[in-house]
Each structure stands twice: as structure tokens, then as C-alpha cells.
Image: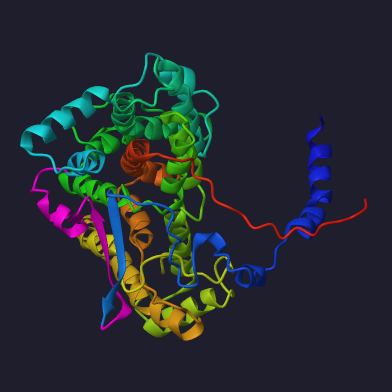
Amino acid sequence: MDQDRLNSYAQKKQDLCVSSDWIPREMYEKYGVNCGLRDKNGKGVLTGLTRISKIVSFKEKDGKKEPCDGELWYRGYNIHTLIRSIKSGEFGFEKIAYLLLFGKYPDEKEAEEFSRILGEARELPQNFTRDVIMKAPTKDVMNTMTRSILTLASYDKRASSNSLEDNIRQAVQLIAEFPLLAVYGYHAYNHYENNGSMYIHRPDPALSTAENFLKLLRPDESYTELEAKVLDVALILHMEHGGGNNSTFTTRVVTSSGSDTYSAITAAMSSLKGPKHGGANIKVMEMMQDIRENVSDWDDMDELKNYLGKILNKEAFDRKGLIYGMGHAVYSVSDPRERVLKYYVEKLAAAKGREKDMRLYGAIEKLAPEIIAEKRHIYKGVSPNVDFYSGFVYDMLGIPQELYTPLFAVARIAGWSAHRIEELIDMDKIIRPAYLSVMEEKEEL
């Protein structure tokens, strides 16, 4: 069919869809339905139990719930404790992935064995890069990765098995392979679509996930210890965030149907690529560039505050009325991931000569919550989230924006895998939420 005719048909039907499907928001309140499975304070509707992680944003005091500094816990350990447990000169992503998967912080022997297994598994089937990744390359590297994950199923003779053994094997394999799928997918796109050079470096089994990512990405395969350390911390902070986030919940929903690992993870990838979920740091980067171009003196707090007000009033940037990187669906006083990451951002900015940018970020971090509180009627506090700084980190590491969300997936595959395994062990019923029909019944055509 002629594509223009199909586009024209779809365009004509837009208004019909809107008139047929629009449900006024007040009807949700009328019937007591939480839109987006969240109440007006942003708290999610409880849909399950988990031992994998916990998010704390409120604490009870004198019988009342009060906002508190945000806390993130992995398998009973506070994220700050886990970050501090990583010794100087070592990397922690592999240890924390082991903790998430198996529920136990690894001793030295277990950590070495797991890292060795990941290193050995960090390879793709013969000719996979040529026959799959380099075919039909696209700027949307998440789509490239998703296609690759589904194709990997055809190389697994027990792809459809729901046995615990097979699913642990598949989880470890995918955690190991994700950096390759992401970076090779980007290089294929950069070569065929941007006429750039293509580098297909081999991973080093002896290196960490963070080190291998930088090695695979860069033409000369080189990186500093600080660069790898900061990326390692960013991966740890992004690898898990409770069972209620959209992509993890998607993993559990698909798993509950009895579907296979590859299908569950590709569904999670499709969720994560949505700009409301995994692409927020790109919007922060775009907003920051707009501020740089429109604020003449970055150290002038009045000029900066005035421009942030214009952004909030839909008079500047993308005119959506949002200061990106500010606020979170769960946290109010602070995002613990942002607190951890900021320390490493400052160290990296100093090493890269980006102190002026760091001051700009710091000023916005201080001013934005004040402006939002003044201009918005909000039910909870507003603070910077991890996305506020993560894009700045990736930019300083020379990571292209096309890899920002794929890098999120490189981290989050560990959390998804842990939740899939927990769902397999505890699975009793298929997850099947209910929708209340507000359809008007018609007696005649």
C-alpha cells in the first residue's frame, strides 16, 4: 500500500479516536481508581511483595508519616553501605549484581568466581555481530538491542525453559552480553548512518563491566581509573529500584504469564526506552544546553532564576513547563542515588576541567526546588533525581547520547533478572489487573 495514503488515513482518524477514547480525569476520582496505579501523592498501589530492594521516602513520627531523606536498599543493605564497601582500586558492579541475583553479599571467593563466569560469558555467538547487529542499524540503539536479545533466543536450545537453572544461566549470560549489544549497536549506527569509523573491539574477560564498556566504546580502548570508577558507581545506582518501576513491573508481568527470559527482557527494554522512564537524562542535557545558550552569566543567580521561571511557565526551552531532573515519583526530600553520584560527579568534573559546568548544575539544584515550590501546588517536596547528574557524567565520559538509555539497560538487566527469578520462585497466578468499564451502552446501531 502507498505509505502516503496510509498516513493520510491515519491522520483523518485521529479525532475519532480521541472522541471515542478520552476519559475525563475526574472520573478516576469518582470511581476511586488510581490513574497510573499511583495516588495523588505519587505512592504506587501495592501489587506484590519482594525481598530484592526497598525504597524509603517517608518515616512515621508521632503517628504521622513525614517526608524523609530518600533511602535505597538492595537485599537489606543501604546503598550508601554498599558503595562504601567497594575498596579503592576495585569495581563493585559484579559484586552487587551477585547480591541482587542470589540474595547474599559475596565473599572474596564467590566474587572472583562470579566475575570470572561473567568474563567468560561476555561473548556473542559466531558472526552474530555481523549477521544481526550490523544489519538494519538505527539511531535507536534500544531497538537494536531488543532485536538482538530476541535473536539470541534462537541460539539457546532451552530458550523456553522456565527451570530455575536455565533462567539463572540466561540471566548471567545477558548481564555479560549487554555491554556488547549496546556498544556494537552504536558503532554500527555511527558507521552506516553517520559515516563514522566502526570499532569492534573484543572484551577483556579480566576487566569489569564498566572497564569493558569504555574499552569497547573508545577507538584507542583506553580509560582512566577514575573514569571507570565513576561509571561503575553509576551502573550500581541504576541496576535496581524496587519492583514498582515500569520496566521491572513489566518483567514480572510477562514472567507471570509463563513466557521465556528473552521475551520478558525485551518487554522490559521496550518499557525502559520510553522517555518517561529511561530517557529522562537526555532531556536534562537538552535543557542544560538551552540554559547555557540563553543565560549570559551562569553565576548570576537572579538571571538564572528568572530563566528557570520561564521554563516552568512554558515560555522557554520545550514549553512543557518542566525543569527536568527535578522531582521523582517516590522521593521528595532527596534521591539517595543523586546524593551518591554527586560526589563522584564533582571529582570527575575537576579532573575534566568542567568546574564551570559543575557550578551551573549546583546553582540549578539549589534554585529549581525553590521556584517549583513557589509556582506549583504540590503534595510532596521536590529535589533533584539521579537523572539530573547522570547525563553530565556520561557527557564527561564521552559517551554519545544514543547510548544513555542503553547504558541504563546495561545496569538494570541485573535488577530485571533478580525480579524474574523471584517471580518464577513465588509465581502463583498470572498478574491480571482490572479495568473498570465506563463504556456507554447503546441499544441500536
Q: Note whether 294 is above or below 233 in the view shown.
A: below
Q: Position of residue 295 (x, y in %)?
A: 45, 74
Tell me the residue at 45%/72% (across/down).
Answer: 41
Name the side, left or right, on which 143 lies relative to 81.
right
Q: Is residue 39 magenta?
A: no
How is colour applied across the structure in the image?
rainbow
Name the side, left or right, on which 11 lies relative to 343.
right
Q: Is residue 69 magenta?
A: yes
Name the side, left or right, on which 52 lies relative to 185.
left
Name the side, left or right, on which 200 lies relative to 211.
right
Start-end of magenta stretch: 62-91
Tell me the residue at 26%/24% (across/down).
Answer: 121
Q: Nearer the viewer, residue 397 or 91?
A: 91
Residue ranking furthest to the front: 428
Residue 160's image quarter?
A: top left
Q: Quadrant of the N terminus?
A: top right
Q: Position of residue 371 (x, y in %)?
A: 44, 81
Q: Note whether 273 is above or below 280 in the view shown.
A: above
Q: Nearer the viewer, residue 269 or 431?
A: 431
Tell me the residue at 17%/41% (across/down).
Answer: 95
- Report whether residue 196 is seen: no
Q: Note whether 400 is above or below 359 in the view shown.
A: above
Q: Nearer the viewer, residue 212 or 110?
A: 110
Q: Position of residue 445 (x, y in %)?
A: 93, 50
Q: Position of residue 243 (x, y in %)?
A: 37, 51
